[in-house]
Image (cartoon, rainbow, N blue to C red):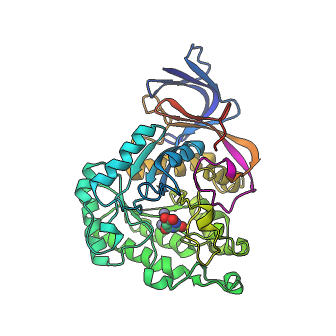
Amino acid sequence: MLLLIKNGTVINPGDKTEVKADVLVEDGRIKKIAPKQAIKADRTIDAKDCYVMPGFIDMHVHLRDPGMEHKETVETGVRAAVHGGFTTVVAMPNTKPVVDNPDVVNYVHNKAKNVGLAHVLQAGSVTKGQRGEVLSEIEGMVEAGIPAISEDGKSVMNAQLYREAMTLAVKYDIPVLAHCEDINMVNGGVVNADEYTEKMRLRGISNSVEDVIIARDITLAKETGAALHLCHCSTKDSVKMIDLAKKDGVRVTAEACPHHFILTSSDIKENDANYKMNPPLRTKEDVKALREGLKADIIDVIATDHAPHTAIEKGVGIRKAPFGIVGLETAAALTMTELVDKGWLTIMQMAEKMSYNPAKILGLDKGVVEEGKSADLVIFDAQKEYSIRPEEFYSRGKNTPFAGKKVKGMVMATIVDGRIAFERAGEEKND
Ligand code: DOR
Ligand code: ZN
Ligand code: ZN
């Protein structure tokens, strides 16, 4: 099939160019990028006033499948992904059962293949059952195609075991995606520890809960030579430590999530668990440090930590509800509105942090818009304004603190391997 995307502005973080051109796609690959291509294609998409960008790659999502399909399934998660402009997602292994052996990896990959809309890469857990006692079947999972190992949802508190896992990650040439949280220091906390949450009489999680494990994990990465990717960084000192570690030559990269670079604990609405996630919303100093870290390319990646829960699960108040919010269908618009439009990032940096850098970290031949490369693309209207409406999400999870927020930036179409996986015109409403 020949697909022609006309009149767009092509953003290619591969060579940092921004050009007005038509993009011709054939058999899943980009065939030609040139202005005014007069070709009779099977399908033509008019991308006038839109960017044509490499499809977004979310290094951090929870698809809840197997075992928690009431929250999300591979299919609903992938539909949410392409609705949000993501062409590849990395699924975290804290499912039921935990993804700690090749059978579960194959289960998720086969399900994703049957859905066929976007690329799903299943990460393997570090320890069996995420119990922190013995290592998972890492070699077998590597053979089954995991792109990384991660204990997300927890930290591996046994540093010796984590060091062994990092040594294996070096051997198999995969990154370690680290959720940094000292489990013993959480001590019943549900929100950030600060003056606002104290007034709400909620127990706090201090920055040190994250910072001590970031320091430990950087130390272990330095010793083992592992590629360490720090998930959902939320504290100002995490940015300082990442900067130092990079300057010291440690193989460290880091991600930040839209909620952490936009909201603070003072935004929390009375007992509304849509503001509860792990790590928690911090202070304005932390938000500023994250934005500065993103701008200075100390933070390499924007990921969502898409964590769907049902309305019933989230409806029991901040103290009791599970941690987590959805993000796949709001990340691009939030990044455009809060970072690009306000001058924190250029559109090129947005493409780097949402496509190019995740591809590099994961070792994928993706994240660029270049002739000969796979046609994973997003057509993004950066000017389009609207309000976020969770009822329009394809995800089963509607748990977002951004409901009603006015944003700028709409995904018009998402193309995966040259096929239109989502298109706004004539879009059918989700149930
Ligand atoms: O907010 C979170 N939700 N943080 C995590 O670490 C886990 C995730 C989940 O699985 O719900
Ligand atoms: Zn996490
Ligand atoms: Zn997570």
Q: Nearer the viewer, residue 290 or 278?
A: 278
- Residue 121 appears anywhere in the view: yes
Q: Nearer the viewer, residue 218 or 43?
A: 43
Q: Quadrant of residue 379?
A: top right
209 sits left or right of 174 in the view: right
Q: Quadrant of residue 296?
A: bottom right
Q: Image point 50% across, 35% down: which residue?
A: 369
Q: Quadrant of the C terminus?
A: top right
Expressed as whole percent of the image width and height from the top left, the position of residue 152 reads 43, 65
- Residue 232 appears anywhere in the view: no
Residue 407 on the magenta span: yes
Q: Main secondary structure of the magenta part?
A: loop
Q: Count of labels shown?
A: 0
Q: Is residue 367 above or below residue 6?
A: below
257 sits left or right of 105 in the view: right
Expressed as whole percent of the image width and height from the top left, the position of residue 285 reads 65, 74
Q: Image point 61% across, 53% down: which residue?
A: 331
Q: Is residue 10 above or below residue 78?
A: above
Expressed as whole percent of the image width and height from the top left, the position of residue 87 reads 50, 42
Residue 286 on the magenta span: no
Q: Is residue 251 above or below residue 269?
A: above
Expressed as whole percent of the image width and height from the top left, the position of residue 80 reads 57, 47
Q: Quadrant of residue 270?
A: bottom right
Q: Is residue 35 above or below residue 366?
A: above
Magenta-colored span: 391-410
Q: Image point 49% across, 29% down: which residue?
A: 418
